[in-house]
């Protein structure tokens, strides 16, 4: 809402208050002033009269002028390029040192000719081109007022206005009215605002019947005014509208806008002679085409509020009038409407048809329901004054029910308690009175409050507390920590578990990502290693790229990978932990990991390509972090089509799938236009977090020294190291403490179809130091077991 | 006496040889040549059998003295040679200590998470519980329960991504309040709810269709606006420094009454006015207020008995202010060069 301070000053004295002080006070009281702007600006401007004007030799457009700038500045030589400069013209002169929005004017010389200033157009003073006609934008301003030497140029032109741009939030719809802004300033600055009163509308019986057939129009008033003349508005009206960001059209349209600007009540005017029948009926049950003022056709739906005459739509209520009964330059007689419509209906209609106007905006936010009679009085006065209206009818009003102002009961104790303040009871009541709330004391503490009609936002005791504190100032609050019974705080188990996993992964050097939840159709279910429900689809996406709620983090991480490769980061390892939501309100917690390029152990000096085993290590690390015993874990080959069949795995815990990981299948790599292998992992963290483990107990350490022993085996390909190690443990679970692979060899020295596996074994007893015979007998049993189970021999 | 002179002469010669030895091997050669059983020095001992009395004693003593002297010299030389040799060996093993280290660094963290975790830690230290709500919400929880009935003008403040007519991606973390209050069944509440939110905004330098919030809610008997101010002062000073001034400005949210915008004094200019704070000396940091009685009522709390305060912090905004991040999209692009800047305090 653009508020002209000149217009506000008609109602309240603002002497001694700078626009900045006014803006600050408003902002802290909850009415944010987004900007303070000057309609036009310029220091050292003076009215001048062109005494002589000659064309400059050697120039096709410049003129050499002498200008009488009054006794202070005398006669100035000024070079001017405007096409309309001529002898005898009264002009605006910017003299040496004048500061204009575009810069400072200095005396100087132009093509060898002295120029002691500039003759100005309104554009150069900063006036928006939309308020100027073609001549005004092409040439210098031709003054009709003032005398040479007058220095109050901006004032003479009504351009000395300051505009406050209010960022109105949904609660203060009353401030879409200049009169209410003046009242707000009265509240905040303790200065009295004065408003003109207009005579009540009296006249013959209204010839137009009015009625509403819908509860969404609780009030509808109509006044007939005859014998008007459509013409240009006077300057004061044009200036008032210009300052408020509205273009002047003609006197009748301008009156509608001006009344809305002052009171917040949108009006609609019908050409009386174009109404098909002497009735205006409000309905919301019509469908079909509607040709509006803008000559476009709109499809109406049931629920749209329409004002009809003879069942034909004359106006889309609160949104736009029809072309059929629109005012034009020949209009003589008008019907003026001041109505109230349900905000929800107007919102639905204007949103659906994308028709947003100053009036629909006011209805959507809510208007004062009880000022239609005053509005009609003001409108009639203006119609008589500006349009030479000859006669008028009385106001004909349909009213669903009698308006009852709101009375709230409250107490000073309540307000102080809510605010945490200890204001005097008298101060609280005084403050409410300042906001035009009529307080009736019930006792020293309790009171009733009669809420003014324009403050439709106040409807509870809590609202009263806000009025008190915003007027007295939020700086009156003294910070006090709450006194609350001690209770146990802390993280929700899932929040805590996510933190544990995230810090572990960062600890082993992976970067933590955050990517968008919304993805495109392809990504919504791509690289899904776990069975998921259908993805949610957004009904009103901004772009195709953000149309689905992802069911998996990997595609987003793959995009992050591509972003990194495109920016020269060719060796990356990162992860994301995210909640995933899918159809039916299902939530999963998922971990995604992507490894690409080389693992830089010592920068590029010592690096090795990422492999399957890096991912396996991450899985084992997490299992270990959660104390999950190896016996509960099963690793098998993954059959997922997006993974390399020979370099991928599925890890299960207690037979529940926990993680799927491996090298991406060449086809999947192609989909993401990747040249090098990428390693990806998806883990179902719900499974990890829900695994129950017993209370941890310390295990005994042997007092006797362990014996280490190596075995080199020749193994048939296809037999895994894990199978062999399990078999070895079976030989003697008590004495065999540890078996580790220390070398795997496949090559020319091996016979076809076999590989060499070197194991390092550790034996130890809790009872004694093992002697050589015991060790060799263990070894014999192991070899025998491996031989009979797998046909494995010792490597010679 | 001739013999004694011989001892001295030989000793001097051997000492010279010991001193001249350049390596352990040379020293061993000296030992082998001059001090072995059959060496010239030990050969002198055979003279003893021809001596008697004082002369015999004097000779024996001289020999012992000389032998001890030689042994000590030998030992000293051995040690000094060993030191030299080890020093030489170590010098030859010297490496370039400026070459790259084994990489044992923490991974980078997205500043979004860094800030979220920090906010969580501050409130947990004050005894708050941390709860999460779902990203996909019902219209009922996202709007109705937050006192924003259908077609309420405030809905225009929050253009939403709808999944069906009654489900949407939550536009704020506030609905988590309602879920927790339902869970608590009328018991006091002291929670924060961090999470992702979504609004139909085109992405640019300062706008993102996805963003994070941390919602805070305290409900009990006797909770006041003054309590809110003290709590936020504690939080914001912990987050932005003890010298920060905190101020309230009137505002409007449908679910709080009174509602305030909370500003802190600019950490760049300390309130004097600079480009960071657009010359105002203060920076808008979060929205807050006293929970609207209707919101309490809908959640089963009698507003005559209970009151509460709530606040919502924008995570990206805090991250951008704290770290001078110039474009909100950087947080979601995943550039590892960006993430790695945040792997430390």
Image (cartoon, coloured by chain):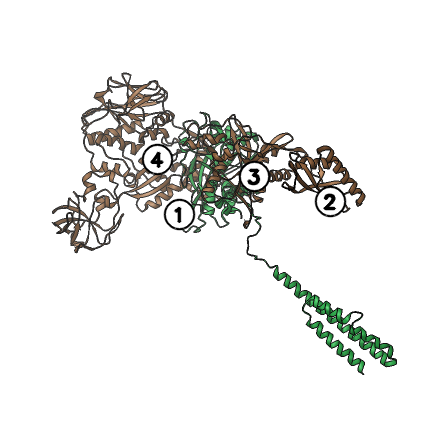
Chain colours: A brown, B green
**Secondary structure beneath disc 4?**
helix
Q: Residues within 10 Å of mark 1 (few under 14, many from 20)?
A: some
Name the side, left or right, on which B156 lies relative to A777: left
Residue A482, horizontal then vertical, whole percent: 54, 40
Judged by depth in the image, the label closer to the viewer, 1 or 2, is 2
Residues at discs 2 and 4 both on one chain: yes
Residue A398 visible in this rendered orientation of the protein = yes
Task: Note whether B148 is above or below B2 in the view shown.
Answer: above
Residues at discs 3 and 4 both on one chain: no
**Which chain letter goes with mark 3?**
B
Spatial separation of the CA atoms under disc 2 and disc 3: 56 Å
The residue labelled by disc 1 is: B280
The residue labelled by disc 4 is: A175
Nearest the viewer among A207 and A255 is A255
Judged by depth in the image, the label closer to the viewer, 3 or 4, is 3
Badge 2 or badge 4: first in the primary sequence: 4
Spatial separation of the CA atoms under disc 1 and disc 2: 76 Å
Residues at discs 1 and 2 both on one chain: no
Spatial separation of the CA atoms under disc 1 and disc 3: 33 Å
Q: Residue at x 23, y 46 (%)?
A: A124
Q: Residue at x 37, y 44 (%)?
A: A24
**Which chain letter goes with mark 2?**
A
**Which chain letter goes with mark 1?**
B
The residue labelled by disc 2 is: A709
**Secondary structure beneath disc 2?**
strand
Residue A299, horizontal then vertical, whole percent: 32, 22
**Secondary structure beneath disc 1?**
loop
Q: Residues within 10 Å of mark 4 (few under 14, many from 20)?
A: many
Spatial separation of the CA atoms under disc 4 and disc 1: 25 Å
**Which chain letter goes with mark 4?**
A
Task: Note whether A392 is above or below A612 in the view shown.
Answer: above
Indicate which disc residue B128 carries: 3
């Amino acid at each position: 809402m653009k508020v002209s301070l000149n217009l506000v000053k008609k109602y309240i004295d603002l002497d001694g208050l700078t626009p900045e002080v006014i803006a600050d006070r408003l902002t802290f009281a909850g009415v944010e002033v987004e900007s303070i702007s000057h309609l036009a600006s310029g220091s050292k401007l003076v009215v001048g009269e062109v005494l002589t004007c000659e064309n400059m030799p050697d120039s096709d457009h410049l003129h050499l002028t002498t200008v009488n700038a009054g006794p202070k500045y005398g006669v100035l030589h000024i070079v001017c390029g405007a096409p309309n400069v001529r002898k005898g013209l009264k002009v605006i002169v910017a003299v040496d040192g004048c500061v204009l929005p575009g810069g400072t004017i200095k005396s100087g010389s132009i093509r060898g000719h002295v120029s002691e200033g500039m003759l100005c157009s309104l554009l150069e003073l900063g006036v928006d081109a939309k308020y100027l006609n073609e001549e005004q934008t092409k040439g210098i301003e031709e003054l009709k007022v003032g005398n040479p030497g007058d220095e109050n140029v901006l004032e003479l032109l009504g351009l000395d206005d300051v505009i406050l741009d209010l960022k109105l939030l949904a609660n203060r719809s009353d401030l879409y009215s200049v009169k209410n802004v003046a009242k707000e300033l009265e509240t905040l600055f303790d200065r009295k605002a004065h408003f003109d009163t207009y005579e009540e509308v009296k006249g013959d019986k209204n010839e137009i019947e009015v009625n509403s057939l819908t509860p969404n129009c609780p009030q509808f008033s109509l006044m007939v005014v005859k014998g008007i003349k459509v013409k240009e508005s006077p300057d004061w009206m044009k200036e008032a509208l210009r300052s408020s960001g509205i273009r002047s059209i003609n006197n009748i349209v301008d009156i509608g806008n001006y009344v809305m600007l002052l009171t917040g009540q949108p009006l609609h005017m019908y050409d009386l002679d174009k109404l098909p029948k002497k009735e205006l009926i409000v309905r919301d049950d019509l469908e079909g085409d509607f040709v509006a003022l803008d000559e476009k056709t709109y499809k109406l739906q049931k629920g749209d509020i329409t004002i009809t005459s003879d069942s034909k739509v004359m106006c889309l209520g609160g949104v736009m009038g029809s072309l059929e009964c629109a005012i034009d330059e020949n209009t003589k007689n008008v019907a003026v409407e001041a109505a109230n419509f349900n905000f929800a209906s107007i919102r639905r209609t204007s949103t659906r048809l994308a028709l947003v106007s100053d009036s629909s905006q006011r209805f959507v936010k809510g208007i004062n329901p009880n000022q239609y009679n005053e509005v009609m009085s003001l409108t009639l006065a203006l119609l008589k004054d500006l349009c030479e209206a000859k006669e008028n009818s009385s106001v004909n009003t349909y009213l669903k029910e009698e308006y009852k102002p709101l009375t709230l009961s409250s107490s000073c104790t309540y307000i102080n308690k809510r605010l945490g303040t200890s204001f005097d009871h008298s101060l609280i009541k005084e403050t409410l009175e300042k906001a035009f709330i009529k307080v009736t004391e019930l006792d020293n503490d309790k009171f009733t409050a009669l809420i003014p009609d324009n403050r439709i936002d106040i409807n509870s005791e809590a609202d009263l507390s806000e009025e008190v504190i915003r007027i007295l100032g939020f700086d009156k609050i003294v910070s006090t920590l709450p006194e609350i019974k001690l209770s146990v705080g802390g993280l929700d188990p899932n929040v805590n578990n996510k933190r544990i996993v995230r810090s572990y992964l960062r600890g082993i050097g992976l970067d933590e990502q955050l990517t968008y939840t919304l993805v495109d159709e392809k990504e919504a279910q791509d690289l899904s290693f776990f069975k998921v429900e259908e993805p949610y689809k957004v009904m009103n996406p901004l772009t195709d790229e953000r149309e689905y709620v992802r069911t998996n983090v990997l595609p987003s991480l793959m995009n992050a990978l591509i972003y990194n490769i495109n920016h020269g980061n060719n060796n990356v390892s990162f992860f994301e932990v995210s909640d995933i939501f899918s159809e039916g309100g299902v939530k999963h917690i998922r971990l995604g990991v992507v490894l690409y390029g080389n693992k830089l152990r010592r920068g590029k000096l010592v690096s090795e390509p990422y492999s399957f085993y890096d991912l396996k290590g991450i899985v084992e690390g997490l299992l270990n972090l959660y104390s999950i015993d190896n016996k509960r874990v099963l690793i098998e080959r993954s059959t997922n089509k997006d993974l390399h069949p020979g370099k991928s795995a599925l890890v299960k815990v207690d037979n529940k799938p926990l993680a799927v990981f491996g090298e991406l299948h060449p086809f999947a790599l192609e989909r993401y236009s990747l040249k090098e292998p990428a390693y990806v992992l998806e883990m179902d963290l719900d499974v990890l977090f829900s695994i129950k483990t017993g209370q941890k107990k310390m295990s005994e350490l042997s007092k006797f020294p362990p014996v280490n022993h190596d075995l080199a085996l020749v193994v048939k390909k296809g037999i895994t190291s894990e199978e062999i190690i399990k078999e070895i443990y079976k030989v003697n679970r008590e004495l065999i403490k540890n078996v580790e692979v220390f070398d795997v060899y496949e090559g020319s020295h091996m016979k076809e179809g076999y590989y060499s596996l070197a194991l390092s074994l550790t034996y130890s007893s809790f009872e004694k130091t093992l002697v050589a015979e015991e060790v060799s007998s263990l070894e014999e049993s192991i070899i025998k077991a491996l031989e009979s189970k797998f046909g494995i021999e010792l490597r010679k | 006496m001739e013999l004694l002179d011989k001892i001295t002469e030989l000793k001097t010669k051997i000492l010279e040889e010991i001193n001249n030895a350049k390596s352990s091997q040379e020293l061993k050669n000296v030992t082998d040549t001059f001090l072995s059983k059959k060496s010239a020095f030990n050969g002198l001992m055979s003279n003893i059998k021809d001596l008697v009395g004082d002369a015999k004693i004097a000779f024996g003593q001289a020999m012992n003295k000389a032998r001890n002297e030689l042994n000590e010299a030998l030992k000293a030389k051995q040690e000094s040679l060993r030191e030299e040799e080890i020093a030489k060996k170590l010098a030859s093993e010297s490496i370039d200590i400026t070459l790259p280290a084994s990489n044992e660094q923490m991974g980078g963290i997205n500043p979004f998470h860094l800030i979220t975790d920090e906010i969580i830690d501050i409130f947990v230290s004050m005894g708050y519980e941390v709860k999460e709500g779902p990203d996909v919400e019902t219209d009922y929880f996202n709007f109705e329960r937050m006192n924003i009935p259908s077609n309420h003008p405030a809905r225009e403040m929050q253009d939403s991504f709808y999944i069906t007519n009654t489900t949407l991606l939550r536009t704020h973390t506030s609905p988590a309040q309602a879920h927790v209050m339902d869970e608590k069944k009328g018991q006091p509440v002291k929670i924060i709810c961090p999470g992702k939110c979504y609004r139909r905004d085109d992405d640019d330098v300062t706008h993102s269709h996805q963003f994070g919030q941390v919602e805070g809610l305290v409900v009990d008997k006797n909770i006041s606006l003054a309590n809110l101010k003290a709590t936020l002062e504690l939080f914001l000073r912990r987050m932005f420094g003890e010298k920060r001034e905190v101020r309230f400005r009137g505002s409007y949210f449908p679910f709080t009454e009174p509602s305030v915008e909370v500003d802190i004094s600019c950490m760049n200019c300390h309130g004097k006015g600079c480009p960071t704070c657009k010359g105002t000396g203060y920076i808008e940091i979060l929205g807050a207020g006293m929970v609207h009685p209707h919101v309490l009522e809908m959640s089963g709390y009698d507003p005559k008995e209970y009151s509460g305060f709530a606040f919502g912090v924008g995570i990206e905004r805090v991250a951008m202010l704290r770290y001078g991040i110039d474009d909100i999209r950087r947080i979601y692009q995943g550039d590892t060069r960006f993430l790695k800047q945040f792997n430390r305090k």
